[in-house]
């Protein structure tokens, strides 16, 4: 059981009548020789660490290594508790959780790279928050994570999830695509709708550069994780409403990769362009490394 | 994608903030600790490229020291690595350096000294996503990742050594994925590095070491 791209994954589902999650699990069984239970238990560990990271940022005051972030999750929570929010409850919680996990990451806490450390807030922020809102069982959440994983595998194989290689579009775009797919699948979307959600999420941030101030995984990475969580939610909403992606998922992945390849190196994690190279960004950089 | 696991995409579980600057650094130092093979008393880290520039902000220094202390990439004690090393009486230093263009931007050279005075030099590169490559060992260019079960043998450069090593490995039923011999000059010492699919047993290592006229040391250094 294997798939090279979205088209093959969808064909697998249609031919076998199995879900994307099941196909992803069976692929892993072939690869590792592990039982389904062992593989699900391994994903359960990832889920637990994601959950703990979300909770930790709400409970503790965290100090990042570079000092450019801290306390954002609690600020958003306070605003949500106090009264009406611009974003509404689910979206507000999702962006708060995404920013919180990035606080944990930047303060040398335990996270799950999903697909990278720099994008580690997006899956927990959007997918776990949606799971809570809809009351999914643990098994449903774990299935959704395998769907996210299947999308991540395809992007890694045919393009890149690395900011150094393809910019932020590759990193937070991929995380949002993975999360959107997981959400759509868990809420009963078809394989085609699942791929459409992933395609939409990637399209929404195509061209986004990677320009971390002082080269650290803090700013603007944390806010782009909030954006990624929101991107996952709106992409899922569109797909579930029956709004397709005009460009098929595999072609979007290919286009994203080509855009990444054409990005100058200054805009791929080197901190030599974009926000990192503004007067304020440069001043912060010299302050940190003085 | 044949070998890519879903847990490479959702995972690893790791101490942040960066897979290359933090998790990769832990893994390089973990290999260094295994190569040093004894109670470590001091370690000097020479940081190259992006490691030299951003090591404080990425916690690369704590991550490296954490690896020397034997912590895994998901061990929360990494953040307190300085204190833990002080408690154990391990001295440490970090110096930016320029190793030249032959090395990856995220590279560290480690000089590790054990309590019995043995010093090991290890150069490792963090090549992305937490993956690493060890590229130099005591002045000798080598290449291995630690992802396979890995055996390093330091041997005399004389006929029959390779046959002896492979015989010992084969007699234990271990399937070799890769095997390479590295040497600087003919007639001196050489390294054999074996990467295997199965765990390399203590008894296989003992069999290899049983011919001291051929073998100086043999160590299992995998990250698995």
Image (spheres, coloured by chain):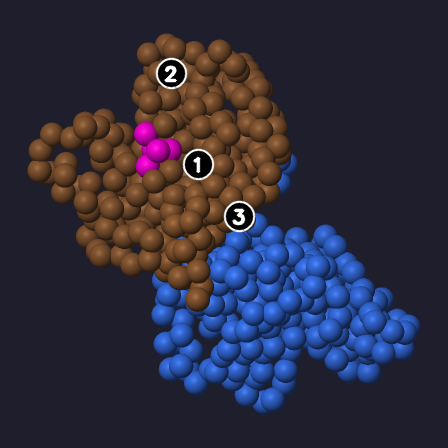
Chain colours: A brown, B blue
Q: Residue furthest bottom?
A: B116
Residue B189: percent from left, percent from top: 81, 77
**Residue at label 1?**
A172
Residue A242: percent from left, percent from top: 37, 10
Q: Which mark is first along the chain, 2 or 3? A: 2
- Kind of element beneath mark 1: helix
Residue at 21 percent of width and 28 percent of height: A87
Q: Which of pointers 3 and 2 indicates the residue nearer the eye?
A: 3
**Residue at label 2?**
A239
Residue at 75 percent of width and 66 percent of height: B141
Which of the pair A19/A6 is nearer the observer? Answer: A6
Q: Which mark is first along the chain, 2 or 1? A: 1
Q: Residue furthest front?
A: A279
- Chief secondary structure of the magenta portion: helix
Classify A198 as above or below A166. Answer: above
As drawn, is A244 to the left or to the right of B197?
left
Q: Which mark is first along the chain, 3 or 1? A: 1
Residue at 14 percent of width and 39 percent of height: A79
- Kind of element beneath mark 2: helix
Q: Are marks 1 and 2 on the same chain?
A: yes
Residue A272 got which mark?
3
- Residue contact at pointers 3 and 2, CB within 8 angstroms: no
């Amino acid at each position: 059981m294997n798939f090279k791209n979205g088209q093959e994954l969808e064909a697998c589902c249609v031919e076998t009548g199995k879900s994307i999650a099941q196909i992803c699990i069976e692929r892993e069984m072939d690869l590792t020789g592990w039982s389904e239970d062992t593989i699900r238990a391994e994903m359960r560990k990832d889920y637990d660490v994601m959950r703990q990271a979300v909770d930790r940022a709400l409970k503790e005051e965290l100090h990042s290594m570079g000092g450019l972030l801290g306390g954002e999750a609690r600020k958003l929570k306070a605003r949500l508790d106090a009264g009406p929010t611009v974003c509404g409850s689910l979206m507000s919680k999702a962006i708060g959780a995404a920013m919180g996990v990035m606080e944990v990451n930047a303060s040398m806490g335990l996270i799950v790279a999903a697909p990278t450390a720099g994008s580690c807030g997006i899956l927990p922020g959007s997918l776990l928050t949606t799971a809570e809102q809809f009351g999914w069982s643990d098994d449903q959440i774990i299935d959704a994570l395998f769907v996210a994983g299947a999308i991540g595998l395809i992007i890694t194989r045919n393009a890149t999830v690395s900011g150094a290689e393809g910019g932020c579009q590759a990193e937070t775009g991929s995380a949002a695509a993975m999360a959107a797919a997981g959400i759509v699948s868990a809420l009963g979307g078809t394989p085609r709708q699942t791929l459409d959600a992933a395609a939409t999420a990637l399209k929404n941030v195509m061209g986004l550069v990677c320009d971390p101030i002082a080269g650290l995984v803090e700013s603007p990475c944390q806010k782009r994780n909030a954006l990624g969580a929101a991107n996952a939610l709106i992409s899922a909403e569109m797909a579930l409403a029956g709004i397709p992606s005009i460009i098929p998922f595999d072609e979007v992945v290919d286009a994203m990769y080509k855009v990444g390849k054409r990005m100058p190196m200054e805009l791929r994690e080197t901190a030599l362009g974009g926000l990192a190279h503004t007067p304020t960004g440069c001043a912060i950089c010299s302050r940190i490394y003085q | 994608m044949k070998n890519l696991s879903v847990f490479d995409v959702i995972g690893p579980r790791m101490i942040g903030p960066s897979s290359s600057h933090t998790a990769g650094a832990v893994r390089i130092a973990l290999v260094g600790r295994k190569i040093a093979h004894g109670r470590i008393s001091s370690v000097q880290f020479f940081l190259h490229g992006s490691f030299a520039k951003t090591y404080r902000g990425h916690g690369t220094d704590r991550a490296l020291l954490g690896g020397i202390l034997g912590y895994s990439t998901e061990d929360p004690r990494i953040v307190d690595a300085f204190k833990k090393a002080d408690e154990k009486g391990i001295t440490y230093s970090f110096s930016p350096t320029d190793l030249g263009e032959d090395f990856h931007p995220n590279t560290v050279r480690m000089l590790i000294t054990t309590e019995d005075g043995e010093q090991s030099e290890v150069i490792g590169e963090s090549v992305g996503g937490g993956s690493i490559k060890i590229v130099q060992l005591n002045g000798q260019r080598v290449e291995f990742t630690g992802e396979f079960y890995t055996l390093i043998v330091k041997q005399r450069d004389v006929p029959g050594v390779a046959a002896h090593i492979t015989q010992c490995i084969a007699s234990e039923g271990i399937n070799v994925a890769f095997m390479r011999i590295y040497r600087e000059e003919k007639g001196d010492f050489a390294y054999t590095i074996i990467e295997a699919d199965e765990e390399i047993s203590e008894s296989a290592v003992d069999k290899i070491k049983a011919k001291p006229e051929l073998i100086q040391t043999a160590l299992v250094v995998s990250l698995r």
